[in-house]
Image: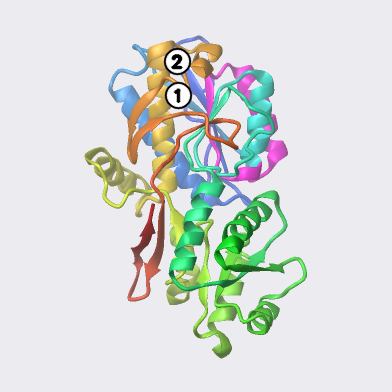
Amino acid sequence: MNVPPSSPGAERTDGSCVRIGALVPLTRPGWVEAGQHLLAGLELAVREVNDAGGIIGRPLELVVRDTAADPQKAAAAVDELAHLGVAALAGEYHSVVARAAAARADALGLPFLCSSAVLDELTEQPTEWVARLAPAQSHGWQIYADFLLGAGHSRIAVAADSSVYWASGARILRDYLAPRGGTVIELDMRTLSPAAVCDELVDNRATALLLLVGHPEPAVSIVKSVRRDQRLAEIMIGAPAGQPEFAEWAALLGGDGAAIPFLRYLPESPSPLGARVEAALRERLAEAPSFVAFEGYDTVAVLAEVLRCHGADRARIAESWPRVVVEGTRGKIWFSRTPGINVWQWAWTPVQVVDRDPAEPDRFRILHAS
């Protein structure tokens, strides 16, 4: 999908609008489908804010920049957006990219409300400038580990790519499972083919394989290889990072992509606001919205409330993080200081473990909820 670098009129400098910079992965190697859903949520909320009169009579506008999952590109976009005079930054899906954006926003004194990235260490030092809607990785992945134990899995293999995010996920699982009788067997995907992964699973007597790898590749090839190996007919494949959430997964894998549990940040039943936004997002996307689309909507809902109450001064926006309370699509949002987290954190959005129903792959089953 070709997306313009910014919304129409988003780069006017006459002071007639209040601008928010949006960081979104819209081209490869970024997770494009996640970026499209995130942007849909951001844009829907902006439209609704403006339909209701804007920010004290001034229209709210997005200035969109494609990060393409590139930390350097994201940091450069933060510099550009700061120069353009945006009041705050929103968005980003990829954790390593969001970390680069957060560091630059902190250095420039530019408020950043991170929508989707979960890496615990979003910044190296405590900062007043950054807040986050998504749950920290340690919170969500420990819930996933509880699900694994409850399902009877104690020998768990992780097929892991090389990145800070995947290494963090493997460490969280290992540290949480070990005292509870679980063993994590790490498979280095820099050296293993999908077929070799199957041999390792058999040799290590693993009962579960977790995909800590990129989408669509090598995740899709690993799933196909495991599903076709008769020795592994009983193994559970899991994807805590959420690869099966999006329609592309089902399109590429069909029935092979079902029954692969993943983390999703939605309540068990929607509120009236959540149901209304879900319907509007479905129309906008022409498909069921993922939780990432709701994260985008909630990001703008929070920033709009802050802007109405405190104006567009960057320092006042940052000072407002601990005081803002907003009814979001997934519950009441407010920010606090959470041990081990250096940014203002919503603690916590609802967390589910879900999978695609083998009998109906377009339908999700809730397997576990926090």
Instruction: Report x, y in % for residue 237.
Output: 52, 72
Q: Is residue 1 visible?
A: no
Badge 2 crowding class, 10 Å Cα cut-off, few under 14, some 14 to 19, many 20 or more, is many
* Residue 17: image tag: 2
Pick out the residue farthest to the bottom.
Answer: 230
Q: Is residue 82 magenta?
A: yes
Q: Residue at x 47, y 60 (%)?
A: 146
* Side of 272 where 310 appears, left or right: right
Q: Residue at x 63, y 61 (%)?
A: 213
List the residue tagged with mark 1. Answer: 61
* Side of 46 where 165 appears, left or right: right
**The one of 272 and 281 positioned closer to us in this rendering:** 272
Q: Is residue 246 magenta?
A: no
Instruction: Report x, y in % for residue 167.
Output: 68, 55
* Side of 322 where 288 appears, left or right: left
The amino acid marked with disc number 1 is Glu
Instruction: Report x, y in % for residue 128.
Output: 58, 22
State how far apart marks 2 and 1 are (Cα).
Answer: 7 Å
Q: Is residue 143 visible?
A: yes
Badge 1 crowding class, 10 Å Cα cut-off, few under 14, some 14 to 19, many 20 or more, is many
Above or below, 27 relative to 152: above
**The one of 58 and 99 positioned closer to us in this rendering:** 99
Q: Secondary structure at mark 1?
A: strand
Mark 2 and 1 residues: CB-CB less than 8 Å, in contact? yes
| First of labels 2, 1 by sequence position | 2
Q: Residue at x 55, y 13 (%)?
A: 315
Q: Which residues are magenta?
A: 69-96
The amino acid marked with disc number 2 is Cys
